[in-house]
Amino acid sequence: QVIVFLSFFAMLLGAIGCIQHLELGLEQTVALPKDSYLQDYFHDIATQLRVGPPVYFVQKGMNLHPDSEDVNKTCSTAGCYPNSMLNQIQQAAQIAPSSYIATSAASWIDDYISWMNPSLNRCCRMYSNETFCPTESTDDCETCFDGNSPDPLFHLHGSRPTVAQINKTIPWFMEAIPSKECAKAGRGAYNTELKKSATDPTGYAGVSEGMVAAARYRGYHTPLATQNDFITALKEANKLTAKISADLGIEVFPYSVFYVFFEQYLQMDYYATVTFAAAAVSILVVSYLFLGSLWAAALTMAVVMSVVIDIMGCMYVFGIQFNAVSLTNLAMSIGIALEFCIHIVRSFTVEDGSRTFRAQVALCRMGTPVFNGIALTKLIGVLVLS
């Protein structure tokens, strides 16, 4: 008895150690036939692709008024906070192997501020009637904010434009085509980066009132090959934006095309805990009601849950990843393990005599029926499913 107990207890401790290293995810190749042509495709993507997926840092509710610090908390040009959002993203890109951020984010606000600068006299230009003059135009146009316009609107006061100046020029910036004379123009690169609105005079939600409803800044993840890469990249992006939000008091969150498929793994520990806890409590209550012994019900619950832990340890040994599918199978295994145990436990509790004698009688009476009637049928059913 001691040898059997110590053997199972050692297996339990080993399984607990293995669970800590259980890998999350569900490899796409596992869901495909081994001879599928997509197997080679996914293999080549994992081994040869050297470009990571784009990641967007979405900022909500940026205040554009000159007396607000939101612009300085966001940008990375002169006058911006050293720990601004874009500066922190750039710093994360410098430690790409751990942050999974490969590049700094393309910033419409930085390029817009530079585009307005009169020192770039081929960027923001206008005709005499104060309409936008494209860079490629050969007409006689004047630089927007060079101080020569009689209209006070086109005189900069300080390093940041007023809301009225933004309302006038941001549609120009978004429609200006980049060229060698003015590479800062926004068409193509930025004209989809702000939330659009058909009712706002500028064409972008909230801008006419000095508030950008939502804007995104595009960067890139490092090349991601494994499920662990995708999950860790999502975690690191969330960690970075959480730090930015806490440091600067602005609302920022990350988004990439693969996030919707991997966000489940951020809560997988929670889902597993709730599933196993609900199962354990149910086993304890129902077993007590039918057996009439709290001690027997508690032992049944402990043995069944140890079986689940051992299975999770075997998952690590055999390289099976932990995901929603395997969690569902583990939940099913709880019911199967309970079916193995409960008949023997009941036979033990209704028998008279010493514990050793009752255990022998329970195994003799129920061991064979359990093995033949439950184990073999379950084995055949599982083999068919596998």
Image (tube, rainbow, N blue to C red):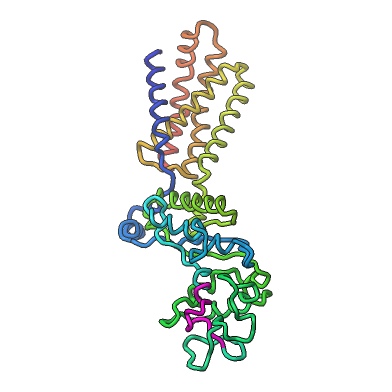
Q: Is residue 118 magenta?
A: yes
- Residue 75: x and y in percent read 52, 64
- Percent x, y for residue 133? 54, 87
Give the quarter of the image for residue 219.
bottom left
Work out which residue is located at the far top of the displayed protein and give it: 353
Residue 18 coordinates in the image, percent (x, y): 39, 33
The residue lying at 57 percent from left, 20 percent from top is: 297
Q: How many marks?
A: 0
Q: Is residue 195 above or below residue 240?
A: below
Residue shown at the point (57%, 90%) measured from the top left: 127
Name the residue located 54 percent from the left edge and 40 percent from the top edge: 271
Taking 213 as reference, is 53 left or right? left
Examine the structure image and report whether residue 349 is included in the region drawn in magenta. no
Which quarter of the rendered picture does the C terminus lie within?
Answer: top left
* Location of residue 206 in the rendering, given as x and y in whole percent from the top left corner: 66, 69
Q: Is residue 385 left or right of residue 149?
A: left
Above or below residue 177? Residue 69 is: above
Q: Nearer the viewer, residue 203 or 365?
A: 203
Along the line of sight, the residue nearer the viewer: 87 or 357: 87
* Image: 10 above or below 30: above
Quadrant of the rendered structure where residue 199 is? Answer: bottom right
Task: Please provide the residue range marked out in magenta.
Answer: 113-126
In which quadrant is the N terminus drawn?
Answer: top left
Q: Residue at x 39, y 50 (%)?
A: 98
